[in-house]
Image (tube, helix red, strand yellow):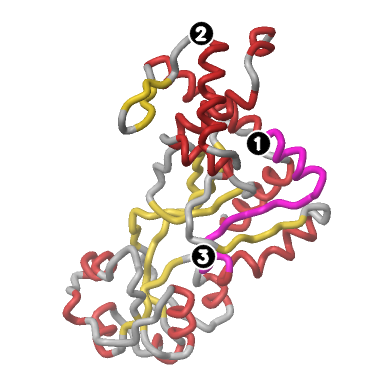
Amino acid sequence: MQNLNRIHLSGLRAVEAVGRLGTLAAAAEELGVTVGAVSQQVQKTERQLGRTLFERRPRGLHKTPLGEEITRRLGVAMAELSATVALADADRQGTLTVSVPPVLAEKWLVKRLSGFHRAFPDITVRLDASLAFVDPGKSDVDICIRFGRGGWPGVRAEKLLDQKVFPLCCPAIAENLARPADIAGYPVIRDPDAMFEWDLWLTPNGLTPNILSEGPDLSNASLCVDGAIAGLGIFLGWEPMATDAINAGQLVAPFPDRYPTGLSYWLIEAEGGTSSAGARAFKRWLKSELS
């Protein structure tokens, strides 16, 4: 590693940031320095390497073939360095930051965290309830749980649970639902932001959307669950979001079949990074709870 003695780490950070973000301005903002400072660091690194990494064009910098390969490898290396530093911080502070969709946090995860704390009293979990995608390799988040189809670039994603939908309603309504066509007589609770339609359940049951009655539009799935508990109508829900309400007898799934949406919950970590002991413990516990 003696060849690293002639290259400054700050220069390599600047090269990686410019290559990843595409502009000097974006790199400067991330690194907390001026555009001129980033430009100087890149030029200095090119002189130290004796090679050109970026072509200067009217519309900005463009990576040379060598620059493409070097910035790609630097990205992997910087992610590993970031994970290493985060590992030291996590072990010292005993805090694990988990970013999780708000509905999953509210309806399922928060209610189970006491079990994790009993099993791992030295680990404090900090929940960040958010829908925004987070790359753990470029933030203070240790683990990110997200909902979708996967395929996010630059991260390591592990499928946790496939989403399968089924009608949910309060016990009083469920008493009158002997067969799928019976839902025609009741209001349907809708989430305008849902990523799927009722036809996922209607079609395999030989039904069409025109049998669905009007009902309240509620702004997120959590409110839809609460509305179904309150008897406002029937909601097309899924587990684990509805698990606790079903177990408590607040909601009933009147028909046994579940139908996949093609969407899943995913556990996302930094690509190429090393998980902390706390993160590994949380992953094992999470998978056990979901199972």
Left or right relative to 280: residue 12: left
Range shown magenta: 82-105
Q: Amino acid at mark 3?
A: Pro
Q: Which mark is residue 240?
A: 3
How many C-alpha atoms fall within 10 Å of the one at disc 3: few (<14), some, or many (≥20)? some
* As drawn, 92 above or below 48: below
How many C-alpha atoms fall within 10 Å of the one at disc 2: few (<14), some, or many (≥20)? few
Determine which quarter of the picture holds residue 49: top right
Q: Position of residue 266 (x, y in %)?
A: 49, 50
* Front-most of residues 45 and 123: 45
Task: Please state which of the two labelled residues, at mark 3 or mark 1, is closer to the viewer.
Answer: 1
- Cβ–Cβ under 8 Å for marks 3 and 2: no
How many C-alpha atoms fall within 10 Å of the one at disc 1: few (<14), some, or many (≥20)? many
Write down the residue under mark 1: 83
Q: Amino acid at mark 1?
A: Ala
* Front-most of residues 107 and 15: 15
Q: Which mark is residue 50?
A: 2
**Residue ranking furthest to the front:** 36
Cα gap from disc 1 to disc 2, whole angstroms: 30 Å
- Cβ–Cβ under 8 Å for marks 3 and 1: no
**Residue 3: in magenta span:** no
Q: Position of residue 15 (x, y in %)?
A: 52, 26
Residue found at x 48% / y 46%:
159
Q: What secondary structure is found at the residue carrying circle 1?
A: helix
- The answer to which of marks 3 and 1 sits earlier in the sequence is 1
* Front-most of residues 183 and 109: 109
- The answer to which of marks 3 and 2 sits earlier in the sequence is 2
Left or right relative to 254: residue 187: left
Residue found at x 64% / y 67%:
110
